[in-house]
C-alpha cells in the first residue's frame, strides 16, 4: 500500500502563475515607474538593456479603455493617471483609494500579463529569412495574444463596486 503525502493547501492564491506562454503577476502601486514607458526608456538608455524600437509603445486595449475614451498608442501622462486610479485627465477619482501607494489601503492597479512565444515559434521565426514571412508570423502571434486577452476580459475580469468595494 502506497503512502500519500499530505501537503497543507494555502487559501491564498500563488504570487505568480506561470504557463509556457503566459505569466501573471499582481502589480503594486509602487511599481508605476517600471510600467511607464517614459521611465522605462530612460532607464534602458542608462543601462543599455532595451532597444526603444524593439520594446515599442503599448496600445490601449479593452472595454474599460473604450469607456474612458482611450484608444491607440498609450500616452504616458494618461497612463500614469489611470494607473493611480484617476480618469485619464486626472479630473475624477475612479476608485476610493486613488493615488494611495502605501499602507493598508494602497490600491492594486491590476495584474501584469506577460505573453511569451513558445520556443518552437521563436525557432521558426529565427530560421525564417523572408521579411514577409516574419511579418506574417508576428501577426499570427499578435492575433493569438488579442484572442486570449478578449477571452480573459469576457470570462475572468471582475471589479468590485460600491462602498468598501
Image (cartoon, rainbow, N blue to C red):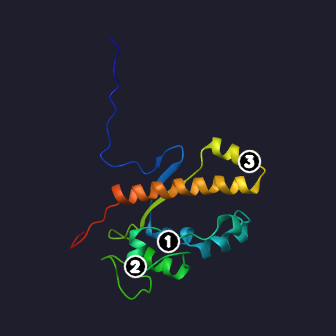
Q: Pick whichever of labels 2 and 1 is earlier in the sequence.
A: 1
Q: Nearer the viewer, residue 112 or 142?
A: 142
* Residue 25 seen in render: no
Work out which residue is located at the far bottom of the displayed protein and give it: 91
Tell me if mark 2 has few (under 14), some (14-19) or many (20+) residues whose alpha carbon lies within 10 angstroms of its own: few
Does 17 sit above or below residue 76? above
**Residue 57 at x, y = what percent?**
61, 71
Residue for point 45% across, 58% down: 149
Look at the numbered discs 1 and 3 and tell me whether their residues touch, using CB distance below 8 Å: no
Distance between the Cα atoms at labels 1 and 3? 29 Å
Q: Which residue is mark 1?
A: 60
Q: Which residue is mark 2?
A: 68
Where disc 3 sits, the SS reads helix
Where disc 1 sits, the SS reads loop
Tell me if mark 1 has few (under 14), some (14-19) or many (20+) residues whose alpha carbon lies within 10 angstroms of its own: some
Q: Pick whichever of labels 1 and 3 is earlier in the sequence.
A: 1
Q: Which residue is mark 3?
A: 126
Residue for point 42% across, 86% down: 90
Q: Pick whichever of labels 3 and 2 is earlier in the sequence.
A: 2
**Residue 49 at x, y = what percent?**
71, 62
**Residue 35 at x, y = what percent?**
54, 68
Distance between the Cα atoms at labels 3 and 2? 39 Å
Q: Nearer the viewer, residue 15 or 87?
A: 87
Q: Is residue 25 left or right of residue 8?
A: right
Does 77 sit above or below residue 40? below
Q: Nearer the viewer, residue 94 or 145?
A: 145
Amino acid at each position: 500500500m502506497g503512502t500519500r503525502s499530505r501537503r497543507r493547501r494555502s487559501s491564498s492564491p500563488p504570487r505568480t502563475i506561470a504557463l509556457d506562454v503566459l505569466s501573471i503577476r499582481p502589480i503594486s502601486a509602487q511599481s508605476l515607474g517600471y510600467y511607464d514607458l517614459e521611465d522605462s526608456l530612460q532607464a534602458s538608455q542608462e543601462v543599455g538593456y532595451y532597444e526603444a524600437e524593439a520594446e515599442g509603445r503599448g496600445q490601449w486595449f479593452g472595454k474599460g479603455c473604450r469607456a474612458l475614451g482611450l484608444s491607440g498608442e498609450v500616452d504616458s501622462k494618461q497612463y500614469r493617471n489611470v494607473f493611480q486610479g484617476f480618469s485619464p485627465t486626472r479630473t475624477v477619482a475612479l476608485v476610493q483609494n486613488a493615488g494611495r501607494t502605501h499602507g493598508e489601503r494602497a490600491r492594486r492597479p491590476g495584474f501584469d500579463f506577460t505573453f511569451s512565444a513558445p520556443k518552437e515559434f521563436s525557432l521558426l521565426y529565427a530560421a525564417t529569412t523572408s521579411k514577409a514571412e516574419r511579418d506574417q508570423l508576428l501577426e499570427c502571434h499578435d492575433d493569438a495574444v488579442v484572442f486570449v486577452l478578449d477571452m480573459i476580459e469576457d470570462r475572468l475580469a471582475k471589479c468590485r463596486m460600491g462602498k468598501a468595494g
